């Protein structure tokens, strides 16, 4: 049963804001639960772990789900069901950040199903709660009896006006030129992810230092809370040590060590290497089966063979890399795989490219759309529209497997986000288009997300988008035994699995635009991290040079079939006139000119975007809108069309407007009937001679453009005629309407 008064502790962020962690009030039947509070922002976190592993469980089944409750922002969900449904991409990304920070700290061999649930239950309007999610998850684990070697925390560090800030709000972030999410224990940095406007490696390391100092304080607060909770938090469940068979282990090493080494050193391609390693494993199993007999093999040998073989393979390859500086594909430690590239591969796309590095291949297609194609970002705290979209697809065919096609998983969402953040930094400031890039991975052997960055950058240039600089990306790895450190450039998939650190760095020739780093070893010094980043920079620049052989700058113009967009500003008061009742006018213009028109409001101006692949169509729509939004001035002359005939004159249309040409202003001579000189559809030149200050109605004259005849030639008429003319001139004002 929960207690009304919880157990709590607190700490202050570097800027003085207080953060409170409390437990014992909510969800006390969970193994661990906390509420983390800063101002009005509150995150509830719970963790539950099964007391036994499922039979045959071979991996650690950890799930982390972060969800923002709409009530936290005083909103009702806008979907059909009016409730929170599946996680948004944004929530998935936060879940991944927390997962990557806490997963490595569970003990080896712990296979009990474990679930971490994080809910934003209250928030300030300008708050960024994502930077508190890992703190909440770690605190829930810290007050539980679940075996775990934390605590950890994550903070966002941003450089704003040259100064670093920890966990800034949304408004402050708008002016940041560097922002990182950093995860760490009190002793070691474990995870880094972020973006920057072409920052240096030195600046990135300094940002990590600032973040780590703040995290140390947060870890100390969690340990203080665990002390207050007592034995429930301090006495963890025992983890049963996995069973061992030293005899089998020794036999596997005796039979396979040299053979594994020979395959590892043969510089085979991915599939051949996989085939030969599988053949060795089969040979091992068959040999041991023959030596022990089926019954003994199944009971005492089989459970260990696969585990010891995989461990031995990992050890042999790691030693080969560190001791001989030889990699699985024969490359040097700092060598990038062979690269070939191509652009304009898809004739119907507005931009396209192929980026091939070794056995990893990305096909990127780019589409230019209008503001109507923007994607809506609708979270509990934030609703906006984004005009840059990047989607990443990883079909099973890329690794030679057969799997049903499904929607994007968490991995795909994460890779797309990393590539998108990398390229977003170089997009032009003034961009009238909505840009969508789709990266289809057609081959994969490591760093497909980085191939996406390279292919996406080339597709942008192929489309004629004036990016600030080309962007490339490279995946790095590290293998260490505590004394020796080997930094690997452009890692393979196999190297990713056996390494102690992997990090991805993207950037231009000038600096870093995004990064993602996971560190699996304790106590890695900052000078080594700096060395790794410097090696990554060299690899990144090499890839940029290879890309430049195909395309190094944006094309001078868009593709002939790409939409052209013209943007004009109109007075805000004309927006309604352009749209028309129920959208009738704008729909008519779009239908008649085969264009797409979007209107938005900014201050006292209306921003009109006209899009079409045909320049003549844009010009036609532009002319229509200019006519509607044109403000005539007295003295202007127009070619007008007679719209209707009245006893007192004619209503004429001119440049999208309508006005009265009074019978007395048609000619210098007296006219008995308007019909005698004008009929509907006639074209006539008129001059604007007045605008009614109250009604805004236009008074027009044709005779003002006609030279007055000599006095003797003027048919003045008799007095009765003049009297009749005066009566016509005194027609009621309510007749002067069309």
Image (cartoon, helix red, strand yellow):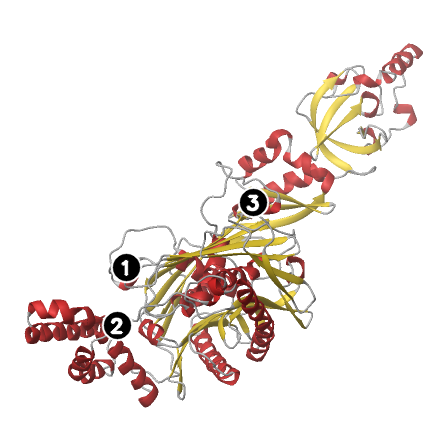
What's the residue at 36%, 57% (across, down)? Answer: 50
Question: Mark 3 or mark 2, which has the lower sequence index?
Answer: 3
Nearest the camera: 305 or 487?
A: 305
| Residue 366 visible in image | no
Q: Secondary structure at mark 2?
A: helix
**Could you tell me how many numbered marks the image carries?**
3
Q: Position of residue 626 (x, y in %)?
A: 68, 41
Quick one: label 2 or label 1, which is nearer the N terminus? Answer: 2
Give me the disc on residue 397: 1
Are discs 3 and 1 less than 8 Å apart at CB?
no
Whether residue 28 sits left or right of residue 717 in the image: it is: left
Instruction: Return the x and y of residue 53 as percentages of the image width and height.
Output: 30, 60
Rendering quarter of residue 606 = top right
Residue picked out by circle 2: 270
Residue corresponding to mark 3? 70
How far, Cα to Cα, is label 2 from label 1?
14 Å
441 with respect to 512 (left or right): left
Image coordinates for residue 439, horizontal then vertical, percent? 40, 59
Of residues 311 and 112, the one drawn nearer to the viewer in this rendering: 112
Image depth: mark 3 or mark 1 in front: 3
Q: How many other residues sit within 10 Å of disc 3, few (<14), some (14-19) or many (≥20)?
A: many
């Amino acid at each position: 049963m929960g207690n009304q008064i919880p157990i709590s502790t607190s700490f202050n962020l570097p800027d003085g804001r207080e953060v409170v962690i409390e437990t014992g009030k909510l969800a006390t039947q969970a193994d661990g639960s906390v509420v983390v509070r800063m101002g009005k922002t509150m995150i509830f976190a719970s963790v539950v772990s099964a007391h036994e592993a499922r039979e045959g469980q071979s991996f650690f089944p950890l799930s982390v789900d972060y969800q923002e409750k709409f009530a936290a922002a005083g909103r009702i969900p806008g979907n059909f069901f009016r409730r929170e449904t599946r996680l948004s991409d944004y929530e998935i990304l936060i879940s991944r950040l927390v997962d990557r920070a806490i997963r490595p700290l569970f003990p080896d061999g712990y296979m009990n199903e474990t679930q971490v649930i994080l809910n934003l239950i209250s928030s300030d309007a300008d708050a960024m709660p994502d930077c508190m999610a890992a703190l909440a998850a770690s605190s829930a684990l810290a007050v539980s009896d679940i075996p775990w070697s934390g605590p950890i925390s994550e903070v966002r560090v941003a450089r704003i006006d040259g100064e670093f800030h920890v966990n800034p709000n949304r408004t402050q972030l708008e002016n940041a030129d560097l922002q990182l999410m950093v995860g760490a224990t009190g002793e070691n940095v474990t995870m880094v992810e972020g973006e920057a406007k072409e920052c240096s490696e030195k600046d990135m390391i300094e940002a990590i230092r600032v973040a780590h100092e703040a995290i140390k304080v947060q870890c100390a607060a969690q340990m203080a809370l665990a002390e207050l909770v007592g034995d429930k938090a301090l006495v963890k469940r025992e983890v049963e040590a996995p069973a061992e068979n030293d005899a089998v282990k020794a036999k596997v090493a005796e039979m396979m060590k040299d053979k594994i080494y020979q395959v590892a050193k043969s510089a085979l391609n991915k599939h051949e290497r996989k085939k030969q390693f599988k053949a060795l494993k089969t040979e091992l199993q068959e040999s041991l089966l023959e030596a022990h007999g089926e019954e003994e093999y199944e009971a005492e040998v089989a459970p260990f063979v696969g585990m010891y073989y995989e461990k031995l393979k990992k050890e042999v390859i790691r030693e080969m890399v560190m001791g001989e500086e030889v990699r699985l594909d024969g490359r040097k430690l700092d060598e990038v795989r062979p690269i070939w590239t191509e652009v304009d591969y898809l004739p119907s796309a507005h931009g396209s490219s192929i980026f091939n590095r070794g056995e990893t291949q990305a096909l990127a297609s780019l589409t230019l759309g209008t503001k109507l194609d923007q994607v809506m970002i609708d979270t509990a705290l934030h609703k906006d529209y984004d005009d840059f979209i990047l989607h990443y697809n990883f079909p099973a065919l890329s690794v030679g497997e057969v799997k049903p096609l499904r929607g994007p998983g968490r991995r795909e969402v994460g890779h797309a986000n990393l590539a998108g953040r990398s390229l977003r930094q170089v997009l032009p400031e003034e961009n009238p288009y909505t840009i969508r890039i789709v990266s289809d991975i057609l081959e994969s052997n490591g760093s497909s997300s980085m191939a996406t960055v390279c292919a996406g950058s080339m597709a942008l240039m192929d489309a004629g988008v004036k990016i600030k600089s080309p962007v490339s990306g490279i995946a790095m790895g590290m293998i260490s035994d505590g004394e020796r450190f080997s930094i690997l450039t452009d890692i393979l998939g196999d190297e990713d699995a056996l390494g102690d650190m992997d990090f991805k760095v993207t950037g231009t020739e000038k600096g870093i635009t995004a990064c993602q780093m996971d560190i699996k070893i304790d106590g890695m010094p900052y000078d080594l991290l700096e060395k790794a980043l410097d090696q990554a920079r060299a690899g990144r620049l090499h890839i940029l040079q290879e890309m430049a052989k195909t395309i190094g700058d944006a094309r001078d113009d868009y593709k002939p079939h790409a939409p052209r967009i013209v943007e004009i500003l109109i007075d805000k008061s004309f927006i309604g006139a352009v749209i028309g009742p129920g959208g009738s006018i704008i729909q008519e213009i779009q239908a008649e000119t085969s264009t797409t028109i979007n209107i938005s409001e900014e201050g006292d101006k209306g921003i009109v975007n006209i899009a079409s692949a045909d320049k003549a169509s844009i010009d036609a729509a532009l002319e229509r809108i200019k006519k509607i939004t044109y403000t005539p001035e007295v003295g202007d002359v127009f070619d007008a069309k007679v719209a209707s005939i009245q006893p007192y004159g004619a209503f004429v249309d001119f440049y999208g407007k309508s006005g009265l040409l009074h019978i007395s202003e048609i000619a210098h001579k007296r006219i008995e009937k308007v019909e005698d000189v004008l009929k509907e559809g006639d074209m006539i030149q008129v001059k604007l001679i007045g605008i009614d200050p109250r009604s805004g109605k236009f008074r027009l004259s044709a005779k003002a453009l006609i030279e007055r005849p000599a006095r003797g030639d003027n048919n003045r008429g008799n007095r009765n005629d003049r009297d009749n003319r005066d009566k016509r001139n005194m027609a009621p004002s309510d007749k002067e309407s069309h």
